[in-house]
Image: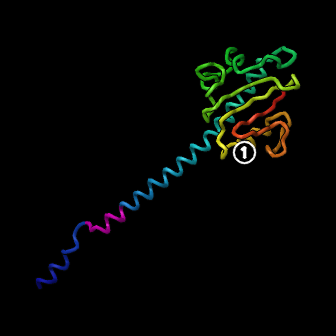
C-alpha cells in the first residue's frame, strides 16, 4: 500500500522538460513577433514615401500657380511656401535627409519646363522596385509599372519620377 501512495504523488510540479518546452514556445513567439514587426516596418517606409511624394506633387502644382512653367522650382521653394510640413522639408527646409529612408527629396525642373522631376535618394535596393511601381501610375507617362516607363528612373539607390503639372 505504501508504494502505491508514493507513485501517485511523485509527479507533482514542473519537470525540467516542461520548463524547456515552455521556454521554447516563448522564444518561438518572440521570434515570430519580431519577424512580423520587421515586415510591417519595411512596408511602412514604402507607404510613407508614396504619401509624401503625393504631397510634394500637390505642393509643386500649387507652387506653379499662374507661372507659365516650373522654371525655378526646388524643395527649398516648396518648403518656404508653406506647402509642405517639416517632416518632408527636414531641419534644413530643403528636403535633405528627410525621406523615410534617410535620404533626400529633391525637386527640379525637367528639360521640358512644363514638367518637373522629384527624386528620392538612399532608397534601399530591396524597396526601390516596389516604390517605383507604386509611383509609376502617378508619373507623367502614367505607366502601370516602372518597367519600361520613361518617366520613372531608377539609378542605384536613387528614384526619379517626372510629373506634369
| Residue at screen point 49% across, 55% down | 32
Provide residue 19's location: percent of width, then percent of height. 31, 63
Q: Which residue is mark 1?
A: 129
- Span of residues in magenta: 14-22
Nearest the eye: 31 or 54 = 31
Q: Is residue 47 left or right of residue 24?
A: right
Q: Position of residue 150 (x, y in %)?
A: 85, 38
Q: Quadrant of the image for the C terminus?
A: top right
Q: Residue furthest left?
A: 2
Instruction: Describe residue 69's horizontal placement relative to residue 49 as left or right.
Output: right
Reply above or below: 60 against 67: below
Instruction: From the viewer's side, name the closer residue of 22 and 112.
Output: 112
Q: Return the x and y of residue 141 as percentages of the image width and height.
A: 86, 37
Q: Quadrant of residue 76?
A: top right
> Which residue is situated farthest in the bottom direction here?
1
Task: Pick the residue in front: 132 or 92.
Answer: 92
Amino acid at each position: 500500500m505504501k508504494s502505491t501512495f508514493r507513485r501517485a504523488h511523485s509527479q507533482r510540479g514542473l519537470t525540467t522538460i516542461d520548463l524547456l518546452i515552455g521556454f521554447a514556445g516563448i522564444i518561438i513567439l518572440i521570434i515570430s513577433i519580431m519577424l512580423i514587426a520587421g515586415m510591417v516596418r519595411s512596408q511602412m517606409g514604402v507607404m510613407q514615401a508614396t504619401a509624401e511624394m503625393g504631397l510634394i506633387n500637390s505642393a509643386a502644382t500649387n507652387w506653379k500657380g499662374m507661372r507659365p512653367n516650373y522654371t525655378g522650382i526646388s524643395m527649398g521653394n516648396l518648403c518656404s511656401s508653406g506647402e509642405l510640413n517639416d517632416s518632408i522639408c527636414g531641419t534644413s527646409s530643403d528636403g535633405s535627409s528627410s525621406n523615410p529612408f534617410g535620404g533626400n527629396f529633391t525637386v527640379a525642373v525637367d528639360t521640358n519646363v512644363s514638367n518637373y522631376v522629384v527624386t528620392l535618394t538612399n532608397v534601399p535596393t530591396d524597396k526601390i522596385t516596389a516604390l517605383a511601381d507604386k509611383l509609376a501610375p502617378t508619373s507623367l507617362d502614367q505607366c502601370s509599372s516602372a518597367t519600361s516607363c520613361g518617366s520613372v528612373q531608377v539609378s542605384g539607390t536613387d528614384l526619379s519620377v517626372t510629373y506634369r503639372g
